[in-house]
Image: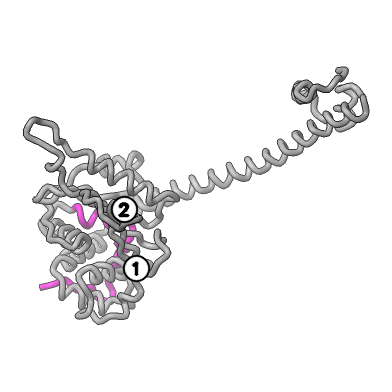
């Protein structure tokens, strides 16, 4: 029997990446099946998760953890898959995704006399974006591979980048559950599972898809476990505080840099004026600097510029 959310259930938002990872990396058959179902819908091919690979410090090392809580796993057919939920994409998100996809692909060991490049397995990076979009089109789903942009011929490689942009999924919400594909049901669940106004449709989806129901059961257990809930919320608060601190530091740095730039610009302007005064008025460097009120520390700069222009002058 599928789990159902009641109107009173205060469900954690699965779009927070640490909540997302907590659900799909639970050491239970249900979590493993749920993850396999999500991956299968994303790559449009049945996948059974064999093992979830360790890719970051232990949960208790909260200060040393990556800000992004991705899930790195290997399927039973050897495919390597990385799945992540992203609430706040990086400024250079496409480059970041490409970098980690390539690193995952090249982590495969094909050394040995009996191995060739044909032994490389397909590698997938699945990035679910909670709010911001990467592409300007209307499609929430994209599957990127290498191809010839002129002749539109695929290279035939084995690296795949899949992006799922939940902010574009409003059209999915207009469909009846029976009309939704498996991917669309996952998208609706991921976007609206914590939304009480969408709870009736969410529960219909839970009745229709075992894999999503298993994820929902784990999510419900976490949401109603006071200790686990507090841990996840504290963990995310630390992340938000860190990001806020970094943003404030960057803004402060920009403000300071702007003021320093203004002051430097003023001094550079005064250096140019001092050079022009020496050239036009035939006064000494000292007199020119006194008239313009240029700090004595720029004396060598004025002299260097006069020499550069071949001007005869007295100091």
Q: Quadrant of the C terminus?
A: top right
Is 117 drawn above or below residue 227 in the view shown?
above
Q: Quadrant of the N terminus?
A: bottom left
Q: Single out the residue that lies furthest toward the front.
A: 151
Q: Give the magenta-colored segment's residue range.
A: 1-25
2 and 1 marks in contact (CB < 8 Å): no
Judged by its main secondary structure, the magenta piece is loop
Provide residue 184's location: percent of width, then percent of height.
25, 71
Res. 18 in view: no
Q: Residue at x 79, y 31 (%)?
A: 271
Question: Does 294 sit left or right of 219 as displayed?
Answer: right
Provide residue 126's location: percent of width, then percent of height.
27, 55
Q: Nearer the viewer, residue 78 or 226?
A: 78
Q: Residue at x 26, y 44 (%)?
A: 59
Q: Residue at x 25, y 82 (%)?
A: 176
Provide residue 301's location: percent of width, then percent of height.
75, 24
| Dot 1 alpha-carbon crowd within 10 angstroms: few under 14, some 14 to 19, many 20 or more | few
Is 156 drawn above or below residue 34 in the view shown?
above
Q: Which mark is residue 283?
A: none
Question: Does 211 sit left or right of 288 as displayed?
Answer: left
**Label 1: which secondary element:** loop
Q: Residue at x 93, y 29 (%)?
A: 281
Residue tagged 2 = 148
Is 54 drawn above or below residue 135 in the view shown?
above
The CA distance from mark 2 to mark 1 is 22 Å
Q: Which mark is residue 139?
A: 1
Q: How many marks?
A: 2
Whether 23 is among the magenta residues is yes
Res. 103 in view: yes
| Dot 2 alpha-carbon crowd within 10 angstroms: few under 14, some 14 to 19, many 20 or more | few
Upstream in the sequence, badge 2 or badge 1?
Answer: 1
**Label 2: which secondary element:** strand
């Amino acid at each position: 029997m599928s789990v159902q959310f009641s109107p009173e259930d205060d469900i954690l938002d699965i779009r927070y990446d640490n909540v997302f990872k907590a659900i799909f990396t639970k050491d239970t058959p249900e979590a493993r099946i749920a993850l396999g179902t999500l991956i299968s819908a994303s790559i449009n091919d049945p996948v059974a998760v064999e093992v979830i690979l360790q890719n970051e410090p232990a949960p208790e090392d909260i200060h040393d953890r990556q800000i992004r809580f991705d899930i790195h796993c290997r399927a039973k057919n050897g495919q390597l898959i990385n799945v992540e939920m992203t609430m706040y994409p990086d400024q250079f998100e496409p480059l970041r995704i490409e970098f980690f996809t390539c690193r995952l692909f090249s982590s495969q060991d094909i050394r040995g006399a009996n191995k060739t490049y044909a032994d490389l397995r397909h590698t997938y990076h699945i990035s679910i974006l909670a709010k911001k979009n990467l592409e300007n089109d209307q499609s929430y789903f994209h599957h990127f591979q290498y191809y010839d942009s002129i002749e539109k011929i695929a290279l035939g490689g084995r690296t795949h980048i899949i992006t799922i942009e939940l902010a574009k999924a409003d059209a999915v919400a207009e469909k009846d559950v029976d009309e939704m594909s498996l991917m669309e049901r996952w998208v609706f669940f991921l976007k609206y599972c914590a939304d009480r106004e969408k709870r009736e449709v969410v529960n219909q989806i839970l009745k229709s898809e075992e894999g999503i129901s298993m994820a929902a059961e784990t999510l419900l257990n976490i949401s109603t476990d006071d200790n686990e809930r507090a841990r996840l919320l504290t963990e995310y608060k630390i992340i938000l505080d860190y990001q806020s601190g970094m943003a404030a530091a960057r803004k402060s740095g920009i403000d300071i840099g702007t003021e320093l730039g203004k002051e430097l610009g003023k001094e550079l302007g005064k250096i140019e004026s001092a050079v022009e005064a020496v050239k036009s008025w035939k006064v000494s460097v000292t007199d020119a600097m006194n008239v313009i009120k240029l700090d004595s520390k720029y004396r060598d700069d004025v002299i260097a510029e006069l020499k550069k222009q071949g001007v005869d002058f007295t100091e």
